[in-house]
């Protein structure tokens, strides 16, 4: 019976991932978008009919399915995502944490949700600043090189920067908790550490100079931890970042 349940969850996750890819390829417009999102909402309704399992393997697959739905909800994160799906995912993570405050997958899910939310304000910053900041760019924590325009307090007081910090702060907090919880269970993954690092890098990029270095330092620490995991390789841009700027941080 458990095997059948696992297969069903795997099938649903594959379906969700296919929907995400199709939405991204078609830029999510027109009737096709509505049909695809209807399919996603049908899967949500199915999950709502279930309880989170106490059996570890099934619970893990349920949480992986919620994670896939969250990625789908933010297939176009710069626009704010599909709000009802995004909110549903966040509520699911919070429900899991009520039962298990140390569930690192749920903590990771919430950290990623807030990181996704930050993309709206980061996209606006990217559109206004030549030295834009996004989670996909290489931030530069060294003094004198880091975003001269951002060093201007008037810019950092701007609404987009305030909003970015307001979403990235909870993101980094949840990711930090996720890392600690995963470490305790000896389940730490490179993917989790990279997401946590990107969240801290982004927060450092939109923060005031007197606090930004602590965020970059934490990001480097997470990247070093990820690099040390046997069999895991950092994405090329983060490996380059660590080589160039990691030496500046003890």
Image: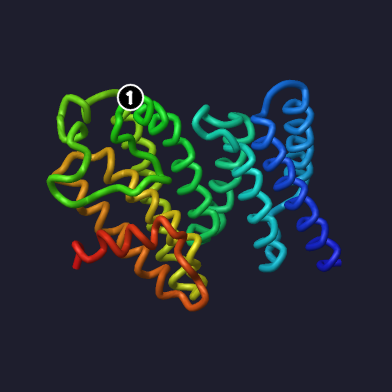
Numbered circles on residues, count: 1
Residue 1 as seen in the image, left or right of residue 142: right
Extreme-bottom residue of the structure: 230
Extreme-top residue of the structure: 30
Depth check, front residue: 154 or 51:
154
Above or below: residue 135 compared with residue 41: below
Local packing at callout 1 (Cα closer than 10 Å; few below 14, some 14-19, many 20+) is: few
Quadrant for the N terminus in the image: bottom right
Quadrant for the C terminus in the image: bottom left
> At 44% from the left edge and 72% from the top edge, which residue is drawn?
184
> At 72% from the left edge and 45% from the top edge, which residue is drawn?
16
Residue 84 as seen in the image, left or right of residue 190: right
* Secondary structure of residue under mark 1: helix
> At 69% from the left edge and 32% from the top edge, which residue is drawn?
26
Residue 152: x %, y % from top left: 15, 30
Residue 158: x %, y % from top left: 25, 24
> At 27% from the left edge and 60% from the top edge, which residue is drawn?
244
Above or below: residue 52 compared with residue 94: below
Q: How is the structure coloured here?
A: rainbow
Residue 135: x %, y % from top left: 41, 45
Residue 139: x %, y % from top left: 30, 47
Above or below: residue 81 compared with residue 110: above
Q: Quadrant of residue 27?
A: top right
Above or below: residue 215 compared with residue 226: above
Depth check, front residue: 41 or 228:
228
Q: Which residue is mark 1?
A: 128
């Amino acid at each position: 019976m458990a095997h059948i349940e696992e297969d069903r969850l795997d099938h649903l996750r594959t379906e969700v991932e296919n929907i995400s890819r199709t939405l991204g390829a078609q830029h999510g417009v027109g009737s096709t978008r509505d049909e695809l999102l209807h399919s996603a909402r049908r899967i949500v309704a199915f999950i709502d009919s279930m309880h989170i399992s106490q059996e570890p393997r099934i619970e893990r697959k349920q949480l992986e399915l919620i994670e896939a739905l969250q990625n789908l909800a933010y297939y176009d994160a710069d626009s704010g995502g599909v709000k009802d799906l995004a909110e549903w995912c966040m509520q699911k993570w919070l429900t899991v944490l009520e039962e298990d405050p140390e569930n690192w997958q749920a903590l990771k899910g919430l950290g990623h949700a807030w990181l996704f939310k930050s993309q709206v304000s980061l996209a606006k910053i990217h559109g206004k600043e030549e030295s834009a900041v996004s989670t996909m760019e290489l931030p530069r924590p060294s003094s004198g090189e880091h975003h001269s325009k951002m060093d201007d307090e008037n810019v950092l007081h701007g609404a987009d920067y305030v909003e970015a910090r307001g979403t990235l702060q909870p993101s980094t907090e949840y990711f930090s908790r996720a890392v600690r919880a995963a470490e305790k269970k000896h389940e730490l993954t490179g993917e989790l550490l990279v997401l946590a690092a990107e969240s801290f890098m982004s927060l450092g990029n939109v923060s005031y100079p007197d606090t930004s270095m602590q965020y970059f330092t934490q990001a480097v620490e997470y990247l070093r931890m990820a690099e040390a995991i046997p069999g895991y390789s950092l994405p090329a841009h983060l490996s380059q970042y660590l080589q160039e700027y990691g030496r500046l941080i003890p």
